[in-house]
Amino acid sequence: MNPRRIGTNEELHTLAQRIGDALGFEWQYSDEQPYKHRAILNGPDDVGLNLAWVRSGGDRLRITSRWPKSIQRGDRVHDFVPYNPRDRPTITVAAGKSSDQIAKDIRRRLLPKYLPRQGN
């Protein structure tokens, strides 16, 4: 079996837009995308998801939860927690799946671990 090549940054952002649409009206592709290599989806109540290709270990997409901007760390407000902390819910999915399939995986595998921590 030939592994699918890792997608381009443009393909990542197109896929993220489709995943946001598939997740429903509360989720949307962010108008602000500060990084080409990572896509941001904004969700309800200031929560969100970061999406990026997994560059090692095969054909995967990493989906990582993003804490709300209101989280305090010391005396500063951070708009995100460092890139890969162990306590943030994260999943990977096969990059060849459709946006609808990926949205189902997010709803089934990631959101139940993530949203209860946010009080949603």
Image (cartoon, rainbow, N blue to C red):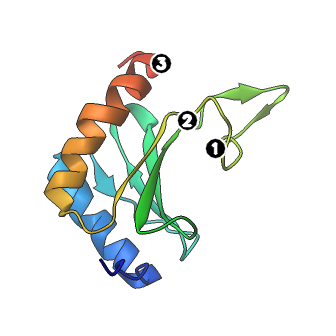
Residue contact between numbered discs 1 and 3, judged by CB atoms under 8 Å? no
Q: Which residue is mark 1?
A: 80
Q: Along the line of sight, which residue is nearer the eye, 27 or 70?
A: 27
The image's mark for residue 108 is: none
Quadrant in which the N terminus is drawn: bottom left
Residue contact between numbered discs 3 and 2, judged by CB atoms under 8 Å? no
Question: Label 3: few (<14), some or many (≥20) within 10 Å?
Answer: few
Q: Residue at x 84, y 25 (%)?
A: 74
Q: Amino acid at mark 2?
A: Trp
Q: Which residue is mark 3?
A: 117
Q: Which residue is mark 2?
A: 67
User: Splitting the image into 4 quarters, where does residue 86 fall?
Assistant: top right
- Toward the right, the furthest residue is 75
**Residue 100 in view (yes/no):** yes
User: Residue 75's x, y, as percent?
Assistant: 85, 27
Q: If you read the primary sequence from the N terminus, does the residue marked by circle 1 or circle 3 appear first?
A: 1
Separation of residues labelled 3 and 2 (CA atoms):
10 Å
Residue contact between numbered discs 2 and 1, judged by CB atoms under 8 Å? yes
User: Residue 69's x, y, as percent?
Assistant: 59, 37
Q: Secondary structure at mark 3?
A: helix
Q: Along the line of sight, which residue is nearer the eye, 57 or 119?
A: 57
